[in-house]
Amino acid sequence: MTRLPSLLPRGPVPRPGTTGLVYLALAVLLALGAALVAARGGSLFTTATTVDLFTRSSLLGFLAIGQTLVILCRSLDLSVGYVAALSTVVAATTMAGDPSRILLGVGAALGLAGLIGLVNGLVVTGLRVNPFIATLGTGLVIKGYLDTNFQGPAGSVPAAFQALGYTRIGVLPVSTLVMLGAAVAAVVFLRRTRMGYHMYAVGGDAEVARLSGIRAGVPTVTAHVLCSVAAGTAGLLLAARFGTGSATVYGNGYELEAIAAVVLGGTYLLGGRGGVAGTLAGVFILATLDTVFNVLGVDPFVKDVLRGVIVIAAVAVYARGQHSRAAVRVRFPPGGAPPPAPGPDSGTGPAAPAQPLGGSR
Amino acid sequence: MSGAPLLRMRGITKSFLGVRVLHGVDLDLYPGRLHALVGENGAGKSTLMKVLAGVHRPDGGTVELDGEPVAFEHPVQAQRAGVATVFQEFNLLPERTVAENVFLGREIRRRGLVDGRAMERATGELLAGLDLEGIAPGARVRSLSVAQQQVVEIVRALSLEARVISMDEPTAALADHEVEALYRIIGRLRERGVAVLYVSHRMREIFDLADTITVLKDGHRVTTVPAGEITPAELVRRMVGRPVSAVFPEPLEPHGEHVGRVRLSVSGGGNAQLDGIGFEVRGGEILGMAGLQGSGRTEVAHALFGVERFTRGEVRVDGRRIDPRSPLRAVRAGLALVTEDRKARGLALHQSVAANGRLVLDAVWPFGSARRARRLPGILSSVELVARGGHDQEVRYLSGGNQQKVVLAKWLAAEPGVMVLDEPTRGIDVGARQAVYRLVRELAAAGVAVVLISSELPELIGMADRLLVLRDGRVAGELPGGASEEAVMAMATGSPHGGPAPEAVDPRTHPAASPSDGPPPHPSRHEEAAP
């Protein structure tokens, strides 16, 4: 049997995936945080702080999961904070304190959010407006609407719905469970559905996707719709917590924090690589940082500085990792004597054959 | 030619922006036959291929598949009809696996969900059908070599049950031993009754593989002949419309003060990819650097130029020890590198010819560069640059050959003492190749030490005074210019084939024998080189 020498495998290249790396970082961060808090004579894992950590992560989680889908398609959504704020107002005013209108309120909020996502997606794919500009634009439109019509709290959320914000099973809030459920759904969506595959394809190379018969706009629009619905869900969660619609929550910079979580989770900002599993770790890393800083009583401004530094450092580490991964194999490792030069007849020795040249002998 | 053609193109015309690039071209493809399409760059080969692939719609003419008229409006329609195309730029997603790429857009589903295992299994079977079990269906495409990526493209075509596969310069990025592998894959495709349309610049492949050859020139079909009834020289003559006297220009009479003096010497050079690299190049000499893809040729060029520098050993230019830690230092020391990837690394594609020509001057000697740049128009005309928009034209609109001339001009402006040319004729047409060869000869004659790296053995053997063969990051040996392709291949693969390796050649002898006629085409080489 003749075999083709040049096309033999390059041999297994075992390396930890980015996702594994992010979870490792999360574990290290938790250990470090726990040690720091313990040094102050406290504990990071009291019920109060654990609940706080999960609560923070559920809100950011919804936003970041949606953002992951959009970024995988090589797009971006800067309107999620405004969509979330709009969603709190729509839900609270629709429900108006009436438990029988909960479903209506949820439907209205998510429906409107989905519609905004549809507009975002169509503007990005159809009008070919840069997603940064397109979604910033829709965000500003929403902001203008909210600022003119809702100066203070609007509407009210019935107690039954507020339970979503506070009920918990052990230390795990229901909202976190819902968020984790959404994350699992997103993972299955990306790994097991054609639409998920096509999102990677469109983000990786839109032309390749097009030449493979994928209608390039469809995955991107879908991602934008799902992202906005996720942002709407985050808004519902905020409404449940506040008990009312609060138009000004858009000022909290959720969209950038969500993007930070996505990037921290190892998703490539230019699309085509990454996933929700990593994003989830990114979310928990940011939530853990917040919680630890709170417990330690770090000045809020210093907190922001530290968080910014950590996000930049993490991405810089990825950039380094990517660089080394792109490099070819090391044939002559530094340090240690180089392997003896093979004689002219010995061919490729067993030590060197990343590309076995004379493999058929 | 017996039987009915599988694919029949008649009177295909196509214009872009009022410029007609195809004038009523006819083409027939038969099952199990390979039809080579040749012509200079701009002759219309790519356009014809893209019409076949459904990328472009023809303005006139008909395409019949199995006697049925077809009109592909989208590549996917062509693929579904069994007409697949392997383009020069791969249509693969580097971050996805082989199987995911093969079934992209047609993912196998089971109960509504994508079945990754079934896709990997099917891909594995297709690979096994080509005796290519070596590529793992679950491997990311990014981790594959260029040759392996090409195989993925071919496997994707097979997964579509393609009956017609067209390939656009499939060997452009392959080393010789990988070309052999491609030959065998093409053999298997033909056994299966696939009709192959094959575009290439390389004469030897065309005569090794083709049953029929069609020559295009300026959008017209010049001729269609059985491969056995035409000689390479005649084929080249019909492509260019003029006889090419010798394939490689004769060496010129050397002049200039540096001729004969050692201008570049490397000893014990090594880094993560290389070890024990040592050689000398004299002024007026062309050193050919041969080796398989991945043997370290480009790495040597990069080490000399400070891209991935040597961590061991020493480099001397004109007797002075230098440490090329960065391209800036290398250029200041008198080195120049014509990179193998001119679009990404050699040119600022969106800038003008003039701006590209000044790049090195402005960057390395910022003061007085305006004065030095006055030489540029002269240099640009000496490299025979043809740019319709003059020197203000953006280089991305130039043909590959003219782009390469801009790269050369950029370096000539810096007046280097040592010039490293990495695949200088890749993807450029016959006429531009001749211009590059002449320029290399002129440089050598003027006393520049030239290091020529190429995957094309005839080019190396025809141009170089001496050959340095690399294997797996080390110097495998030296051969005199005009050595046989078998000897080079034997040394490059490390096979004992070809008797004792003639390493005893004194590297300092300037071979008197003129290698300028190039070796005769040798169709059987590929079978011989593979043990």
Image (spheres, grey):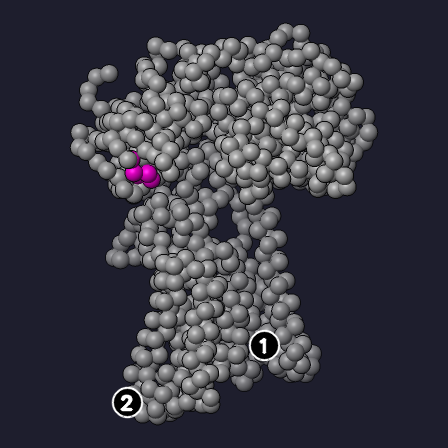
**Residue B231: which quarter of the image?**
top left
Query: Which residue is at the front of the view, B34 or B506?
Result: B34
Examine the structure image and report whether residue B57 is included in the region drawn in magenta: yes
Is residue A174 positioned above or below B292 on the image? below
In the rendered structure, the answer to whether residue B218 lies left or right of residue B334 reads left
Instruction: Give me the residue at 60% from left, 66% from top.
Output: A311
If you read the primary sequence from the N terminus, does the residue marked by circle 2 or circle 1 appear first?
A: 2
Identified by mark 1, the residue type is: Asp
**Residue B251: which quarter of the image?**
top right
Q: Name the mark nearer the viewer: 2 or 1.
A: 2
Instruction: Give me the residue at 19% from left, 30% from top.
Output: B66
Identified by mark 2, the residue type is: Ser
Q: Which residue is mark 2?
A: A100
**Residue A310: which quarter of the image?**
bottom right
Secondary structure at badge 1 equals: helix
Magenta stretch, overall SS: loop
Mark 1, other Cα within 10 Å: few <14 / some 14–19 / many ≥20: many
| Residue B115 visible in the displayed image | yes
Instruction: Give me the residue at 39% from left, 91% from top.
Output: A156
Q: Which residue is mark 1?
A: A290
Residue A194 location, x and y as percent?
32, 55
Q: In the drawing, what numbered circle is on residue B113? A: none
